[in-house]
Structure formats: C-alpha cells, structure tokens
Image (cartoon, rainbow, N blue to C red):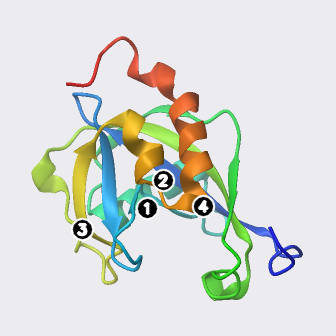
Amino acid sequence: MGAAGAGLPYRRGVGALLFNAANRVFVARRIDTPGGAWQLPQGGIRKNEAPHDAVFRELAEEIGTDRAVILSTSSRWFRYDLPEHLVGKVWKGRYRGQEQLWFALRFTGTDADIDLAAHDKPEFDAWRWGDYDDLPRLAVSFKRVLYQDLVSEFRSVLGDTPAP
C-alpha cells in the first residue's frame, strides 16, 4: 500500500460463503465495477452489532434472503487493502481497506428466495452458484489473495462431498 491510505484504519465487516446443498457457492456480479466483477456477499458491521447478526443482515440486504445457517466462522479477521486509486473515494475516504470476519453458511431456502433487487440500492445485477475453487479467479485483483485464503480456510466445511 502506498502513502495514500497508510494512516487510515480498516473498515470492520463480515463476509459470507453461502453454500447450497450441492456445495456450490453463491457469487454475484457487482453493478458498479467495470467488467462486472464477481464477489461473495459482504458488508460492514454497524455500531454495537455482533458479526453473526451483521452477516444475516448483509445477506438480506444484498441478496434478498437470510435463509441460512452458520456452518463455521473464520479463525481470524482477514484484511485487504484498496488499490490506491480507490482510497479516498469509497466509504467516504475514511478507510484503507476492510478487515472482515467470514462465515460459511448453508443456504436453507430455494433459488426463488434470492432477490437482488430487494434493497433500495442493489449492489449486484446477476448471480449464480459457482465452483468453490474458482473463487480466486473470479475476484477483482485486490481481493484475489483474500479469496485464496478463504478457499483454504473453509475447505474442511465442504467435507468429502464433491461439487457436481
């Protein structure tokens, strides 16, 4: 990270690896990213909000449903830095990146429960169930290492059930 964000704190947040019954992971395409980057649901933690409450709120806001159960929580907080051209532009310029607690969740609803337009400011314009091992390839460059770490962190959640 260059000088642009060196003195700024990290924004506290949560992220969700939402698995369907076939161990495929939910990914969605961002509206505001040139080229339509795919990512996992994630978002900030509000003041006095517990991380496990935040992940369900973020799911409801971003994908229109919180029909899920927590399978596992990451062993640590993961960080990523924004690229310099975004520091000062996102999150009102207050943060250098994010520090996130991640959750693996089992989706308990049906595909019909997912509604990307449920919130007044949708973040995504498309979604799909993807291959877990493809997550790093789908991520924007500055989140690629994070997604590689998440794939390693939550590998055991999938057990011996291969994705179809």
* Disc 3 target residue: 116
Give the CA separation, mark 4 to mark 2.
22 Å
Asked if labels 3 and 2 touch by Cβ distance under 8 angstroms, the answer is: no
* Disc 1 target residue: 58
Mark 2 nearby-residue class (10 Å; few <14, some 14–19, many ≥20):
many
The quadrant holding residue 121 is bottom left
Tell me the tag on residue 159: none
Q: Position of residue 28 (x, y in %)?
A: 31, 59
The quadrant holding residue 30 is bottom left
Give the CA separation, mark 3 to mark 1.
12 Å
| Front residue (pair 141, 119) | 141
Position of 126 with respect to 51 (left or right) is left
**Residue drawn at point x = 29 percent, y = 29 percent:** 23
Element class at badge 2: helix
* Disc 4 target residue: 142
Element class at badge 1: helix
**Taking 79 as reference, is 92 above or below it?**
below
Asked if labels 4 and 3 touch by Cβ distance under 8 angstroms, the answer is: no
**Taking 78 as reference, is 81 above or below it?**
below
